[in-house]
Amino acid sequence: MGFRAQLAALAGRFKQEVAFYRALQKHPQTPRLAKILLWLALGYLVLPFDLIPDFIPVIGQLDELVIIPLLLYLALKVIPVNLRQACRDEVESADNQK
């Protein structure tokens, strides 16, 4: 598998994950705390300021690699397994129809 194919597979997987989190956010049975945590993760990703400024060597760049996955992990822990699986199935079926 070449580099271009690996990159395309990674981009496809990223697109699928974004669609999964969007489906979780829209689902009426998703707990409010999980929705708040998902919005916090998105906000931290796109807002121009950080809790730890990027000009601090190493730690400044690594805070996004710790905080965003932690928020996503906590959100997924709050959401029931059957609801996560239903949203995952919904995203996969939408991808298969394309």
Image (spheres, grey):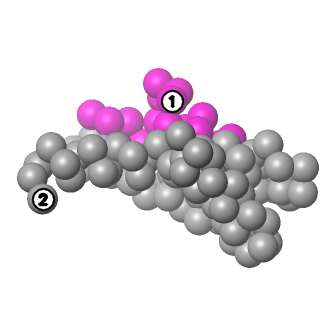
Camera-side residue of 1 and 70? 1
In the structure shown, which secondary structural element does the residue marked by tag 1 occupy?
helix
Q: Residues within 10 Å of mark 2 (few under 14, many from 20)?
A: few
Q: Residues within 10 Å of mark 1 (few under 14, many from 20)?
A: few
Q: Please say if 81 is above or below 93.
A: below
- Mark 1 to mark 2 CA distance (whole Å): 32 Å
Task: Say if 77 sits above or below 42 in the image.
Answer: below
In percent of width and height, residue 91 lies at 62, 51
Chain part drawn in magenta: 39-55
Please say if 84 is above or below 7: below
Q: Quadrant of residue 75?
A: bottom right
- Is 44 colored magenta in this rendering? yes
Q: Earlier in the sequence, mark 1 or mark 2?
A: 2
Residue beneath label 1, please? 46
Identify the residue at horizontal 27%, vertical 34% (top origin): 55
Count the marks. 2
Q: Residue at x 39, y 46 (%)?
A: 12
Q: Which residue is painted at 51% across and 29% down in the image? A: 46
Whole-percent x, y for residue 87 in the image: 71, 58
**Residue at the limit of the structure toward the bottom, as seen here:** 81
Q: Is residue 37 visible?
A: no
Extreme residue in the left direction:
2
- x and y percent of residue 76 in the render? 67, 65
- Give the quarter of the image for residue 86: bottom right
Relative to 21, is 98 on the left or the right?
Answer: left
Towards the viewer: 26 or 96:
96
- The amino acid type of the residue labelled 1 equals Val
Q: Residue at x 55, y 47 (%)?
A: 95
Report the residue that reaches farthest toward the right: 28
Mark 2 — residue? 1
The residue lying toward the viewer, choosing from 24 and 3, is 3
Q: Nearer the viewer, mark 1 or mark 2?
A: 2
